[in-house]
Amino acid sequence: MVWFVQILGIGLMFALSPLFWGITQTTKARLQRRRGPSLWQPYWVIAKNWQKDTTVPEFSSLIFRLAPSITMAALVAILISIPVAGQVPASWPRNLLTVFFLLALERFWTGLAGLDAAGTFGGLGASRVTTLGTGIEPALLAALGIVWGVSGHATIRPLAPLLHASPARLFPWVLASVSLALVLLAEWGRLPVDNPDTHLELTMIHEATLLEYDGRFLALAEWAMALKVTALATLGWVLLGPNCRSLWANLALRLGEVGLTAIAIGVVESRFTKVRFFRIPMYLAAAAGIGVLAFYLVAGGFSG
Amino acid sequence: MSQDWIDHNIAHKQAGDELLSLTATRDGQVRATWMNPGDGRQTSYATSVIDNHFPSLTRALPEVAWDEREIHDLFGFVPQGHPDLRPLVRTPRWPSEFFPLGAKPIRCPAWLDVEPDNPARTVQGDGITIMKVGPTHAGIIESGHFVFSLMGENILHLDIHLFQNHRGVEAILEDQPIANAVPIVSRVCAGDTVSHQTNWAMAVENLAQFVPDPLLSLRRVILLESERVLSHLNDLAQIPAGVGFQRAHQQALAIKECWQQGLKQLFGHRLLFDTVKPGWAAGADPDALLMLIRRLRQQWTPWRTLVEGHHGFHDRMTGVGVVKPHDAERFGAHGVVARAAGQARDVRSVHALYADMRPACILGQGGDVKARFDVRLGELEESLRLLEASAMRLRNENESPLRRWTVPDTLSGRAVVFTESPHGLNVHDITLDCGRIARYHIRAGTYRHWPLLAQAMPGNTVADFPLINKSFELCYSCTDR
């Protein structure tokens, strides 16, 4: 049963990730007083690109053609290592450090893909993605430091029952949640860090590395972007969100939570403007600081 | 003789006069027209083209750099001593003997089959990236080719290549009878069309010594200010889009749409094409106009509160794209760009149409994106006030119909006319000969601002360029012609 629910959970999250993207888009449209396209629009866009011919820049290498599959594979691997319904079979690989390294791999290949076609925008995008990465990676580590603080190792499992057991741990739990939310907005490339909807090529960060892609590669990259949001939101909710006893209830809860995250992203993107590129380190430093504080409060005996 | 030409022009600049136009004629004259901004008095100078050369003013007056390059490209006259004679309008596809406004006109030359080649000015050195953007862009925008020299995220130099869509409007207008001009002049640019039409109408009326009655002037003020509201709404909508502030962007576009639908009802055209002719202007029911303004204000006031209270938006606008007052002066900046840099330049103060309206001159501080945004906010409300005042006056005016006037068909002479378009001082330098157009030169509001935009870019980050560009909101169509 645990096997079945875990595999079903992974399948559902993978298949529904464009829908969650659509929920964000619809939320934004409504807050801008537009009707906006249908919730299913991301599927149509991906299907459209999938059917198109795929062209490759003349002087690009194998790297350019491998990058979309590798980034997609890294994200799928991240999704697999998350106990979507809270529990997984005993032998299931679920190490948090693996997630970090897979994210680093994804970022590395995104940057390579941007550089490989030798376009100016791709290069600029690759430079920005890697620059941001040096800030995002430690901030994410700090935001999730609470996992080590609570259990002393890096297994992905629901922490909320442990944190809620003592009232003194509630405050670090809040801090960790805030920190994680801030870092994930940056990791997803959403406002106030990056604007996934812009057509202004000079301001793009992640999108700039995808400018040379079309056809199936672009479809894959679009699905990967949606999957990144879904997978990391699932990870966050599993670690810090509420947890039920029943597997099925947990699975349903997770879907609702990720849907809620999609709406929240839409609200945040409507409230904020993009910050200046050179101010993003301040933003990430604040998120990391909050995360480190949560870690010390839990690990440093404050709970005792 | 040539020293005279340079001295006269420098003297006018030093006296604080505005350069209205600098252009050539087919028969080898180069003419400059200056205006005293205090009383509107105009002075013209001419110099002859000798042996295909004329003395360049650019080293002393950088604001005429593009005018002289344009003369070089279109007439074939060489400005002697010009520091940068790269093609401005010409493309490599033009045969070398083809000068569209030159002494020997060739209507339809055999275009050469060569690749476009824009020799851009770039910075050379280690670690410098050359980034080329355009002429086709990712959004629905006009065609411009921008070559950035970057050091990391920082802009060191920007070279702008416009005239990608040069239509040859000035050549088309030559030899046209007066009656044919309105539709062409109307379509020089959709953003400043009323201003262009009014210029043409005033030129014909000035040459025919026709004095417009107050009703006609009032109608033109209403059209000009309606255009300013439309244009400023558009520009104010575009600036938030540059920083991902989609909510303000979309809502402002909705307000603009409401205004355009109102214009369609009142004047019959969403962009106000063909609303001003010599001796005539489209009229509107004052009550319907007042109603439209009231509807606009209902949406405008909450929008203004939204953008004025948004900290992140203000943070992005402050201190970027700064136009220094010294540069504004040197490049002859006008309109919103100059006023945001603290310079009170608004030709409505000397314009006959606005004789008893006294429009307030809204000034900004700092010359950055925020100053230009704030000046537009203030000017839009000032335009609404002028519109309301005009509508009230129109209502009190007794219902006398517009005096019918037919344009005399043997009109001759030269007139340099101007209006304050939403993008600044818009000048037409028109010569008529026996009821036909002999020469039609357009120096629109944005023409003088493009070089200034390039001047203001170094020191900013490349990611801020769309925001800064949108805060200038320079028209390509008026410039390319």
Image: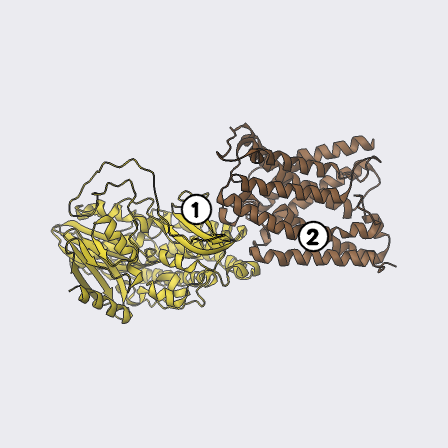
Chain colours: A brown, B yellow
In the image, taking residue B225 as reference, residue A162 lies left or right, namely: right
SS class, disc 2? helix
Image coords of residue B51 (percent x, y): 15, 54
For residue A138, the mark is: 2
Q: Nearer the viewer, residue A140 or A37?
A: A140
Q: Nearer the viewer, residue A206 or B114?
A: B114
Residue A62's image quarter? top right
What amino acid type is highlighted by mark number 2? Pro
Q: Is residue B290 above or below residue A153?
A: below
Residue designated by label 1? B133
Q: Residues within 10 Å of mark 1 (few under 14, many from 20)?
A: some
Residue B342 visible at all: yes
Q: Is residue A79 above or below residue B182?
A: above
Q: CA distance from mark 1 to mark 2?
A: 34 Å
Image coords of residue B41 (percent x, y): 22, 68
Q: Is residue A232 above or below residue B201?
A: above
What amino acid type is highlighted by mark number 1? Val
The image quadrant where one finds the N terminus of chain B is: bottom left
In the image, taking residue B412 as reference, residue B236 lies left or right, namely: right
SS class, disc 1? strand
